[in-house]
Amino acid sequence: MAMLKKASNLVQVLTMIDSLSQEEKVILKNQLEKTIWEREFEDLTSWGEKHFEKWCKTRGIDYKNLEEEDVDRIVAEAVEKNRSRASTNV
């Protein structure tokens, strides 16, 4: 029954989209693309925060009490370390 309801809702949405003018369809498409991109960005940001928190934990860094300056310093040190490592592997 739930599947039938979803199919009915989909038909209604498609019918509504079909009735839009070309300009309205372009606007809708742009809004949908923006929404999808924003969602992907939020997912990536969330993943990055979780990964950084785990990274801090493995190094004994108190993630929850980090100040912005601490994060900047940690990132700068990691970038420098990786650049140094990359330049010695050339």
Image (spheres, rainbow, N blue to C red):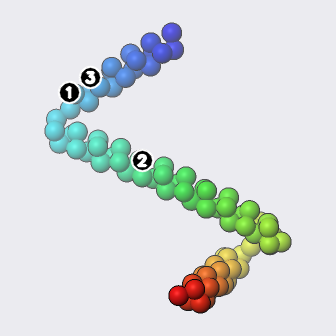
Residue type at mark 3: give it: Thr
Element at label 3: helix
Mark linked to residue 19:
1
Q: Is residue 53 left or right of residue 39?
A: right
Location of residue 46 with respect to 10 vertically, above or below: below
Residue 83 in view of the camera: no
Residue type at mark 1: give it: Ser
Query: Residue 63: x percent and y percent?
Result: 76, 68
Element at label 1: loop
Kindly report the distance in space between the C-alpha atoms of the residues bearing marks 3 and 2: 22 Å
Query: Which residue is tagged 2?
Result: 36
Mark linked to residue 15:
3
Viewer-side label of 2, 1: 2
- Which comes sooner in the sequence, label 2 or label 1? 1
Question: Which residue is at 33% across, 20% downward?
Answer: 12
- Which comes sooner in the sequence, label 3 or label 2? 3
Residue type at mark 2: give it: Ile
Front-lying residue, 75 or 18 = 75
Location of residue 29 with respect to 17 vertically, above or below: below
Q: Residue furthest left?
A: 22
Query: Residue 4: x percent and y percent?
Result: 44, 12
Q: Is residue 72 left or right of residue 43?
A: right
Tag 3 and tag 1, C-beta contact below 8 Å? yes
